[in-house]
Image (tube, coloured by chain):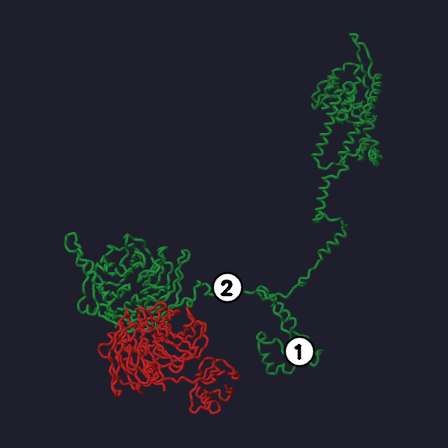
Amino acid sequence: MGSAKANLKRKASNIEANDPATTVKIAQDSDSEDFGDFGDGILNAVLDDEDSEDDSYSFDGEGGDSDDGEETGSEYDIASEDIPTDDEGGENKLALTNGTTDLDKGEGEGEDEDEDEDEDDQSNYRIEKDANGGIRYVYDEIDPVYDSDDSDAQDPTNTIGDIPLSFYDSYPHIGYDINGKKILRPATGDALDSLLDSIELPEGWTGLTDPETGKPLNLSRDELELLRRVQMKEVPQEGYDMYPDTVEWYTSHVEQFPLSAAPEPKRRFVPSKHEAKRVMKLVKAIREGRILPYKPPEEREKEEEQEDEVHYDLWADETPRPPNVMHIPAPKTAPPGYDLSYNPPAEYLPTNSERKAWEGTDPEEREKTYLPQKYDSLRRTPAYDGFVKERFERCLDLYLAPRVRKTRLNIDPTSLLPKLPRPEELRPFPTVASIEFTGHDGRVRSVSIDSSGQWLASGGDDGTVRVWGLSDGKQQWQVKLSSEDPVDVVRWRPGQDGLILSAAVGEDIYLMIPSTMNPELEQASRAILDAGFGYASNAKQQTTATGARKDPPAKWARPGARLENEGVLLKATVRSPIKTIDWHRRGDFFCTVSPTGQRSAVAIHTLSKHLTQIPFRKLPGGAPQTASFHPSRSLFFVATQRTIRCYDLQRQELVKTIQPGCRWISSLDIHPGGDHLIAGSYDRRLLWHDLEMSARPYKTLRFHEQAIRSVKFHPGSYPLFADCSDDGTLQIFHSKVVNDLMEGPTITPVKMLSGHRVVNRIGVTDVTWHPHHPWIVSGGADGTCRLWT
Amino acid sequence: MTEFPANDNIDLKRYGLSRIINSSSMLDTPSPIPFDFLINGEYLRSSLQEYLQTNGLNAEEMLNVQYVRSLIPPVHQASFEHNDWISDIDVLSATSRAGVWSGDKLVLNQDRIVSASYDGLLQIWDPSGKSMARSSSGGHTASVKAVKFLSLTQIASAGLDRTVRIWKYAESDGGLQGTLKPSLELYGHKASVDALDVHGPTGRVLSASADGAIGLWTTSKSSAPAAPTNLLPARDPSPRSGNYPDHTIRTIDLTTSKVENVITTSHPLLALTPLHRNPGNASSSVLLAAATAARHITLVDPRVSATTTSVLTLRGHKNMVSSLAAGPDNDYSLVSGSYDGTCRIWDLRSVRSATKSEGGGNVSESVYVIERESLKGTKQRRTAGEVPGRGVKVFGVAWDKTFWHRQRAARIRWCRSIGDRIY
């Protein structure tokens, strides 16, 4: 800002330049402009001083301004650089001193100028009157001294430039000087003149002609001297001193005290935060060891050497280790025995035969690598010749023998098996055969125990049905139903209200009342059987579309006097041979399955009405094998060779199709709880199904070597089921079924019962459980039934 | 007790030791009494040396040998044959229960055996095997399951025809012929009656039926409500039949017909007999021996209520134990018949603690095994899987001081009862 004002003033002063009165000022201005190159502060101070004389008002403002500028500058400095350095202070001080001294200086200079002006007045010009009578300054010619670098004083130079002189050969001149005058060709003398010239050589003759001037080029003495110096490789300038004495332009002497008397600034006394920060940084660095106290290099090297040479004793604090898996100590050499002594007892010394034997054997096969030897004294003991070899072999052994513990994967195969409870904990279950029921001629095909647990019924190939006392094995009753056909199946009617046995022979179902010396029960049973006769006679005959009488699915009738006397009271004949009978739990319905019976394969019979129904007109999946009622719900299961279908009898629809995944289902049974089903198959599989879950088996048990003939759940309170197979064995399983949906049933095989003989590759044909005890009865192809308890 | 060095006697067996005891230096018995020797609850059956070897004992150790009067093994004396299986027998002799009840009326040498058969007949035999009498018509219409002498002249029987029948038995003067006439038919049970017990002086008959009921009958014609008889000990409600699923022994007060005590076992029970301990003493107690279908006999203490307090388990039978009889002359012997075709005599003093596989508790083993006479000598090798005692099941035993009887049933038509005399 100050400089701008100065410029304005400079302009103003230039305008007034014509005024002779102000010449001094102009000169002063020009001088002060020179100063302005050095710095504003100086100029300002000078100008301000001048301004203060005429305008005190502006002084204050400008001075304040300038102060402001300084302050802002210093502030900026502080802001930009954290560290208030002494340099700044010095600058300020310098500025201050400049400020103070400039005034004096300015005054001093002003005086000097005045003196110069005085001299110029005398010599520089003279005042003349011009044509108008005005004053005219006429300046003298400037006489350039020798030092002057005015080149105009030289000879007129040719200005033709680079044009060859031959261009001017036809002209009398050779070019033009700076004023446009022709430079005339120097006159060329005669040959005689030149000869003379050559005899009387002028000083500095070179024999050359200056091309520019056409004159002979002579060299002065100085020039020759210069050339000589150049030739001599000396400094060309004469009198140049390469090593002059030092002139101390600035003093090297340091003053002790500051020149300024200004009071010390406050920050000299206030502890610097920045410094504190720096100190803390350093302290931290020292603490962390980044800054180390200075040490002489030799000492440091020594220390470093010492540090390098620190040795640790690996075994200083070693404690005997417990035998670790990975730590295998090197085998110790055995301590020497008596036979290694130089003077061993006589019994250690080898006999001749031993010595020969030792020498005879291969060195590698010797038990000892040495022979005990006796010496009179230790002095006579020779050096051990095998020492080096032995050490070497020992070292080789330690080095090469891999003392690595090999981790062998030792998995106990039994641990991979699922955790099953021990069979002993799952008692009771049948374990031994207690009673054998013998009497059947030929195979026993089917066995059944009545709901009271007293009577066992069996039917066999001899066409008889026999009833045995279960607990004593005494045959109580017998009837021969057929002389040709075997009794395929016998089943007791459930319920305590009567004692009715059903048996199937060929196409006939016989319902009989075995005599158990219980007239009331027999009477009740007879009433149950006879109740349906009225219905049968009253029932309408079904007719076909043509009006002809349709054949009823079954004929219910009395079996004939002979059988009636023996207790067989009812006979129902269906169209094809029956293989299985299953009673509904209420004892009024039973279903029969005749696998060859095409459309009427499955029949449901109503005992109280003597009525036979064929619920399935068409059964998908081939011939049905067996059928069963659900123990608690109105469901009906029909098993074909490969699938089991579950029908709802009330709503008459298919509920579920179960696919056990076997080839030929032989039998099925439903858990008394009602949620599970087991099926046995002729391809040796026993399949457990969870009815709530998928159609695929929950468990497949393949423990038999031959076809499974029959499977049965214990009907009572024991969580047991059993199957029987053609390999002559029964297998008893314990099945824990819990209500928890998250947990599946636990099936544990507990016992294999063997004892039945296998006849014609048929073993055990049927099993049945005692209703109350963990007892099972099996019927075999060897003609016996066995009670297993 | 005497201590004596056994060095010179180490190869002695029971007989030698018994002779030492009988010798004048020890007991000085006028006539030699056979003794048995119990070492650690086991009867010595071999020489001392072998015993030491088998038990791994040092010969220098002290052995505590207890000598007891030995149970003399029964000797087969006679066999009696029926046409069908025999289901039960009872004995009448001076020392049998019925004989005691009859008192002086019993003539000497009037020992009789009654046997019941599955063909519904009762038969009276004299000890020599002569058939004295056979039940005539009007008897049981089906198998007889139990028979008991009520007194010298009365026999009670029960069977599959759901009746309990009282028979009158009379003999001719010479004791050569007898007659057996039905005198009373007691109806009431709804299923076959499987077991009987009688009390002669009051004429009470207790019957157990497969229908789960116990009947208490009086034999007097006037079937007035009977005076209370508490003499009879508790009876298993479901002997023989296994019909009861609850495997319990119930003590029933006959006066009030209340169940006093229920003892639950883990197996079906087939027979029950009381063993009187210290009879006549104030501290007399009854131990019940129950034959189970699980091939052992459990002795339970009925005094402790509500829980099974199995005092002792007698193991050894190979099949279901069907019948039991207490020893007549002491309170620690017992005979059992089993479907495996053997009878076993047990001594309750020979006790050892059971191994873990046997389920803990105390276990005893039989002293003697009486095999079937017909099978003796024919040491057929038992084929694997054959049912033990096939065809030679023992259905009933009776033990008396005078006699001891057992009978077995064969599966073929001939059946017989065998009486073996002890003394």
Instruction: Tell me the quarter of the picture where residue A624 sits.
Output: bottom left
Tell me the kind of residue under disc 2: Leu
**Where is residue A306 drawn, in percent x and y?**
73, 56
**Where is residue A708 drawn, in percent x and y?**
33, 65
Out of A586 and B54, give the one closest to the viewer.
A586
Q: Nearer the viewer, mark 2 or mark 1?
A: 2
Residue at position x 49%, y 88% in the image: B9
Cα separation between marks 2 and 1: 47 Å
Tell me the kind of residue under disc 1: Ser
**In this structure image, what is the colour of chain B?**
red
Q: Earlier in the sequence, mark 2 or mark 1?
A: 1
Residue pointed to by mark 1: A341
**Where is residue A605 drawn, in percent x and y?**
24, 59
**Where is residue A479 drawn, in percent x and y?**
22, 70
- The green one among the chains is A
In the rendered structure, the residue with mark 2 lies on which chain?
A: A
Residue A543, compared with residue A784, is above or below; it is above
Residue pointed to by mark 2: A409
